[in-house]
Amino acid sequence: MSKLDKDQVVAEFTAAYQAAFGKAPQLEQKPGWFSVDGGKNIRLAELAELGASYGAADAKPAAAKKAAAKPAATKPAKAKTAKAKNSGDGQSAAVVWAERLGNKQRQPRGCR
C-alpha cells in the first residue's frame, strides 16, 4: 500500500472537480476526514478515487453529476404490517391479549 500525499491528492481532486463541474469544491478538512461541499465525510484514499472518477468522467459529465448529487440511496417507506392492524385501537395491552387469546392460553407476563 503506497502512502498518499495529502497536498497532491487535494490538488488533483480540485482540478478534476473543476473540470467536471466548472466550479471549485468546498473541501472541509477534519482530522483524518474530508467533506466535499458539506456532504458525507470521506477518507483521503476515497477522495483520490473520487477525483479519479471525475477525471474519467470527462467523456460522461452527466453520469458524474448524478453520482455526486446523491451518493446514498434512500430507503423506501415500509408498508403497514399486520401488527398495526391488530394494535387494539387504543386499548390496553391486557385487553388486547385477552381478546386475542381468550381462555385458550395464559396471558403474557405483565398482562395478567
Image (tube, helix red, strand yellow):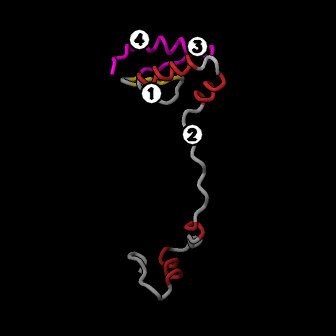
Please give the name of the residue rendered at 57% of the width and 46% of the height, measured from the top-left corner.
75
Residue type beneath disc 4 = Asp
Magenta highlight range: 1-29
Q: Which of marks 2 and 1 is nearer the N terminus?
A: 1
Say which residue label 1 marks: 42
At mark 3, the secondary structure is: helix
Q: How far apart are marks 3 and 2 (CA)?
A: 25 Å
Q: Distance between the residues labelled 2 and 4?
A: 31 Å
Question: Relative to the observer, which residue lies in front, 33 or 8?
Answer: 8
**How many C-alpha atoms fall within 10 Å of the one at disc 3: few (<14), some, or many (≥20)?**
some
Say which residue label 2 marks: 73
Please give the name of the residue rendered at 44% of the width and 27% of the height, measured from the top-left corner.
42
Q: How far apart are marks 3 and 4 (CA)?
A: 16 Å
- Circle 3/circle 2 CB separation < 8 Å: no
Please give the name of the residue rendered at 53% of the width and 22% of the height, measured from the top-left corner.
53
Say which residue label 3 marks: 18
**Residue 105 found in image quarter:** bottom left
Residue 7, label in figure: 4
Q: Distance between the residues labelled 1 and 3?
A: 19 Å
Question: Relative to the observer, which residue lies in front, 58 or 103?
Answer: 58
**How many C-alpha atoms fall within 10 Å of the one at disc 1: few (<14), some, or many (≥20)?**
some
Please give the name of the residue rendered at 44% of the width and 14% of the height, measured from the top-left corner.
9
Residue type beneath disc 2 = Ala
For residue 8, side relative to residue 21 (left or right)? left
Q: Does the magenta stretch include residue 2?
A: yes
Residue 108, label in figure: none
